[in-house]
Amino acid sequence: MAMSVLKNRRERGFLDGQFLIAMPGMADSNFSRTVVYICAHSDDGAMGFVINRPQQLSFSDVLLHLDLLGEDEVIRLPGSTLDFPIRCGGPVESGRGFVLHSDDYMSESSIPVSDDICLTATLDIVRAISRGRGPQKGLMMLGYAGWGAGQIENEIGANGWLSCPAQEELIFDTNLDSKYERALGLMGISPAMLSAEAGHA
């Protein structure tokens, strides 16, 4: 449902290209201490990706699972390819893969999500990465975060999220442990300043 928000959008919504940063009182454990990069937002809903949740699978696991390469081929891949980062992108369709990447790679199925960042959800980009022809910067996401019409606006209104303009460097940064704090830092906020009771009076 939310993927159609991205494909069918005619103009950018006010949350497009924004970070959503979970407030300490976030009741949904799927989003506790998360930073979400919003790719599309309209009257129909919103979709994006959690950028600071690790994924247990490696890129070599993905290549083997998809039968794109055999084990003997995978072990010969350079470390930079094998280390291609994978994240838990969100609770929706968690078995489906998406690659958020710099715009130096484009295929017919790539969708621009900002001036510099694209999204590709087809096997061609996985093959390109395995052959050393992928984007300079990228993250593979398993699953995504989606909201129905008006849902994210209501959650923001209930103090569930803070929002600020996304920073490309933070999206592709591989240091997950401090990403939540650094995203808050973009707004000049430290976690100690936030109360878990905000909005519950």
Image: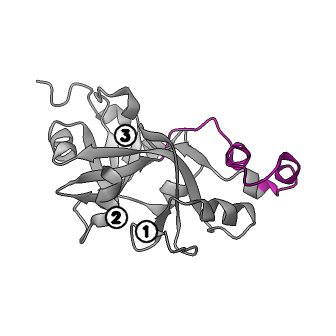
Marker disc for residue 190: 3
Q: Is residue 84 above or below residue 93?
A: below
Residue picked out by circle 2: 7
* Magenta range: 51-79
Residue 196 percent location from the top left of the image: 27, 26
Residue 141 is left or right of residue 61, and the answer is left
Q: From the viewer's perspective, is the residue at label 1 or at label 3 nearer? A: 1
* Residue 101 can be seen in this image: yes
Residue 132 percent location from the top left of the image: 74, 67
* Residue 187 can be seen in this image: no
Q: Is residue 21 magenta?
A: no
Q: Residue at x 30, y 35 (%)?
A: 23
Quadrant containing the C terminus in the rendered view:
top left
Q: Image quadrant of residue 194?
A: top left
For marks 2 and 1, the one nearer the N-term is: 2
For marks 1 and 3, the one nearer the N-term is: 1
Name which residue type carries label 1.
Ile
Viewer-closest of 160 and 83: 83
Q: Residue at x 69, y 48 (%)?
A: 59
Q: Is residue 189 above or below residue 125?
A: above
Local secondary structure at mark 3: loop
Q: Is residue 62 magenta?
A: yes
Residues at discs 2 and 1 in contact (Cβ within 8 Å):
yes
Viewer-closest of 12 and 4: 4
Alpha carbon separation for disc pair 1 and 3: 34 Å
- Residue found at the far left of this picture: 201
Residue 40 is left or right of residue 43, and the answer is right
Alpha carbon separation for disc pair 2 and 1: 8 Å
Marker disc for residue 111: 1
Q: Residue at x 85, y 54 (%)?
A: 73
Local secondary structure at mark 1: strand
